[in-house]
Image (spheres, rainbow, N blue to C red):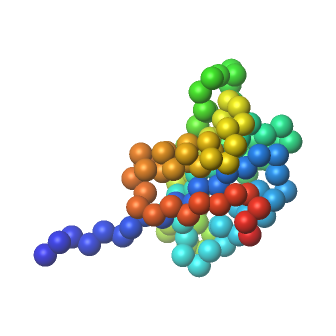
């Protein structure tokens, strides 16, 4: 008899200079009745304080030296309302704005590499 395995779901959110909308989107994602297994945040080189906002929520860390490659921080947060569940968060800051297509490409690539089975793709203005 095959061993049953729960499929893993990740949301991929791409943002660029819409910190307020991103905050609302993240709050909505974290209130889902079926908690996410992963959250992949792609900051497309925002200049409006998005990185600082994510850091203040514990979802990103120091950027370090400027680089030509995306900078990723991996952390785990408790799923609100589900104290026994953790959400794996990958916060990626792009070295330049690659547009929506570039951001989704980066997010999907990382999600597949991390072993997620299902991806929920959205811009930061989806509530």
The picture places residue 81, in percent across and down from the top left corner, at 61, 74
Q: Which quarter of the rendering shows the C terminus?
A: bottom right
Q: Up-down: is 123 above or below 27?
A: above
Q: Nearer the viewer, residue 125 or 1?
A: 125
The answer to whether residue 38 shows anywhere in this view is yes
Q: Give the quadrant of residue 80.
A: bottom right
Q: Up-down: is 19 above or below 43?
A: below
At x 26% / y 72%, what residue is drawn?
Answer: 4
At x 59% / y 55%, what residue is drawn?
Answer: 12
Q: Nearer the viewer, residue 7 or 53?
A: 7
Q: Up-down: is 33 above or below 22?
A: below
Q: Which quarter of the rendering shows the N terminus?
A: bottom left
Left or right: 70 in relation to 123 = left
The answer to whether residue 76 shows anywhere in this view is no
User: Looking at this rendering, what residue extends furthest in the bottom direction?
Assistant: 33
At x 59% / y 79%, what residue is drawn?
Answer: 33
Q: Give the quadrant of residue 26.
A: bottom right
At x 56% / y 63%, what residue is drawn?
Answer: 120
Q: Nearer the viewer, residue 88 or 105?
A: 105
Left or right: 19 in relation to 10 = right
Q: Nearer the viewer, residue 37 or 117?
A: 117
Q: Up-down: is 2 above or below 68?
A: below
The picture places residue 115, in percent across and down from the top left corner, at 39, 53
Left or right: 122 in relation to 2 = right
The picture places residue 126, in percent across and down from the top left corner, at 73, 66
The picture places residue 49, in percent across and down from the top left corner, at 84, 42
So how many labels did they put on this image?
0
């Amino acid at each position: 008899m095959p061993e049953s395995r729960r499929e893993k779901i990740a949301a991929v959110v791409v943002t660029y200079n819409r910190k307020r909308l991103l905050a609302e989107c993240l709050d909505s994602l974290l209130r889902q009745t079926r908690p996410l297994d992963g959250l992949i945040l792609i900051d497309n080189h925002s200049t409006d304080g998005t990185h600082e906002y994510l850091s203040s929520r514990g979802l990103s860390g120091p950027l370090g030296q400027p680089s030509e490659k995306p900078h990723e921080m991996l952390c785990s947060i408790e799923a609100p309302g589900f104290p026994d569940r953790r959400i794996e968060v990958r916060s990626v800051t792009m070295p330049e704005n690659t547009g929506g297509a570039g951001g989704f490409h980066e997010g999907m690539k990382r999600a597949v590499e991390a072993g997620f089975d299902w991806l929920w793709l959205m811009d930061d203005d989806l509530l």
